[in-house]
Amino acid sequence: MHYRKLILLLVFTAGLTGMLRLSASTITITVTDAGDTYPYTNQLREAINTANADTLNDYIINFNISTIGSTPVVIYLTSLLPAVTNKIVFDGTTQHGYASGVPTVIIDGSALSSSSVGLIFNSITGAEVKGLYLRDFYDALVFSFCTGCKANYNVINQNTHANII
């Protein structure tokens, strides 16, 4: 009988810690590679996967991609990015050459299917996308069941359906 109470207490406690984020830290990841190929080291896809895997902390994804002579930097996606399931701020304003309202990081979906989405945010509070250029998607940004999520200082065009949902 005592074992049942202990198991129930452990299950209840585990459920509460999964629902409550008592003291989240903010961790910064910097994308330094514009590629989208395996093993994805220092690339946008790896940064999203890393942030999604850690539900105890919030993340900022900065950009510091080397350019040889020209900006902007184009990230040509080879497959859909993973849905964002943790609080992440994508900060394209950190990429060298950014000027107010003129993003220097382009996320390009031209190689994807005609129904692809650039960034999907699922059930998040406080995520943000700023200073990015999203092009050639069916939908550029989708905020699904999100509260307090923002999209600021982005350029979003050449999308088939809608820009932000």
Image: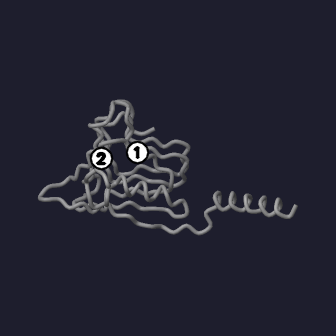
Residue type at mark 1 is Leu
Q: Position of 65 compared to 25: left or right?
A: left
- Between residues 132 and 11, which one lies in front from this camera angle? 11
The residue lying furthest to the left in this view is 69
- Between residues 20 and 6, which one lies in front from this camera angle? 6
Q: Which residue is mark 1?
A: 119
Q: Quick one: label 1, few (<14), some, or many (20+) residues within 10 Å?
A: many
The colouring scheme, among rainbow, by chain, secondary structure or one colour, is: one colour
For image coordinates 48% across by 55% down, the residue present is 52
Q: Position of 150 compared to 3: left or right?
A: left
> At which x and y percent is residue 121?
48, 46
The vertical placement of 12 against 76, above or below, is below
- Between residues 143 and 76, which one lies in front from this camera angle? 76
Q: Are marks 1 and 2 in contact (CB under 8 Å)?
A: yes
- Between residues 140 and 8, which one lies in front from this camera angle? 8
Let me know if residue 82 appears in the view: yes
Q: Does label 1 or label 2 sit earlier along the sequence? A: 2
Q: Position of 63 compared to 8: left or right?
A: left
> CA gap, disc 1 to disc 2?
10 Å
Quadrant for residue 118, please give it.
top left
Let me know if residue 102 appears in the view: no
Give the numbered dot on residue 107. Answer: 2
Q: Quick one: label 2, few (<14), some, or many (20+) residues within 10 Å?
A: many
